[in-house]
Amino acid sequence: MHNSRCKLGALIVATLISLASVPVLAFSTDEINQTSLQRDFKLLDVDSDGKLSAAEIKKDSMFDFRSFSKADKNHNGSLNQDEHATYKSKVQQEEAKQAASDSAITTKNKSKYLIEKNFKSFKVSVETKDNIVVLSGFVDNQATKNRAEQIATSVKGVKSVKNGLLVKP
């Protein structure tokens, strides 16, 4: 009884900490973002003509030929500051949403491991990238390894699980 209360308390604390930190990590103010985007645009615009050519935009790792074409809304073969900022801001928002989703999946997995009976959750590392969960660490037996994967797979939003847990001899 005492052990399950401790695990429940740890679960609540872990969940609150992770949920409190997600908005701070995922979102920045529009003002900071706009200033950053304006600075990026000016640095890329080497000929200072107020537009970015395909050659100039190659210096930005967020852009390739396909993304350049998507960003070029007026189809004139160059990006003005608004086209550049709109596209880049959208990509950054999608990345922030994905990071928040990955963080939530990791937290849900860790929380489920904490309340699982006979599961030494502190010996299992959980990482999530693009909704793919990677498990690593050590477990006592094959059944625990299988259960860890089963739990991870059950979390909403998980695409797949890479189970790298090692069974201790």
Image (cartoon, rainbow, N blue to C red):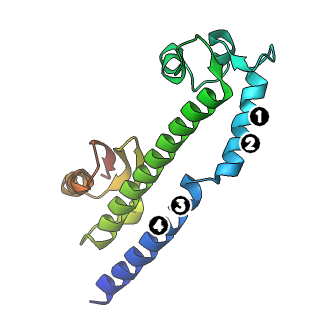
In contact (CB < 8 Å): disc 2 and disc 3: no
> Which of pointers 1 and 3 indicates the residue nearer the eye?
1
User: Looking at the picture, how far across and down is residue 18, in whole percent?
Assistant: 48, 65
Amino acid residing under circle 3: Pro
Instruction: Say left or right for 132 vs 66.
Output: left
For label 2, the residue is: 35
User: Looking at the picture, how far across and down is residue 36, in whole percent?
Assistant: 72, 40
In contact (CB < 8 Å): disc 2 and disc 1: yes
Disc sitting over residue 23 in the figure: 3
Alpha-carbon distance for marks 2 and 1? 6 Å
> Which of pointers 4 and 1 indicates the residue nearer the eye?
1
Q: Is residue 50 above or below residue 40?
A: above
| Camera-nearest residue between 14 and 16 | 16
For label 4, the residue is: 19
**Dot placed on the residue nearer the N-terminal end, 2 or 4:** 4
Instruction: Say left or right for 19 vs 60.
Output: left
| Residue sitting at x 80%, y 13% | 47
Amino acid residing under circle 1: Arg
Alpha-carbon distance for marks 3 and 4? 8 Å
Label total for image: 4
Alpha-carbon distance for marks 4 and 1? 32 Å
Disc sitting over residue 49 in the figure: none
**Dot placed on the residue nearer the N-terminal end, 4 or 1:** 4
Amino acid residing under circle 4: Leu
Alpha-carbon distance for marks 2 and 3? 21 Å
For label 1, the residue is: 39
Q: Secondary structure at mark 1?
A: helix
- Neighbour class for label 1 at 10 Å: few (<14), some, many (≥20)? few
**Quarter containing the N terminus:** bottom left
User: Looking at the picture, how far across and down is residue 69, in whole percent?
Assistant: 50, 16
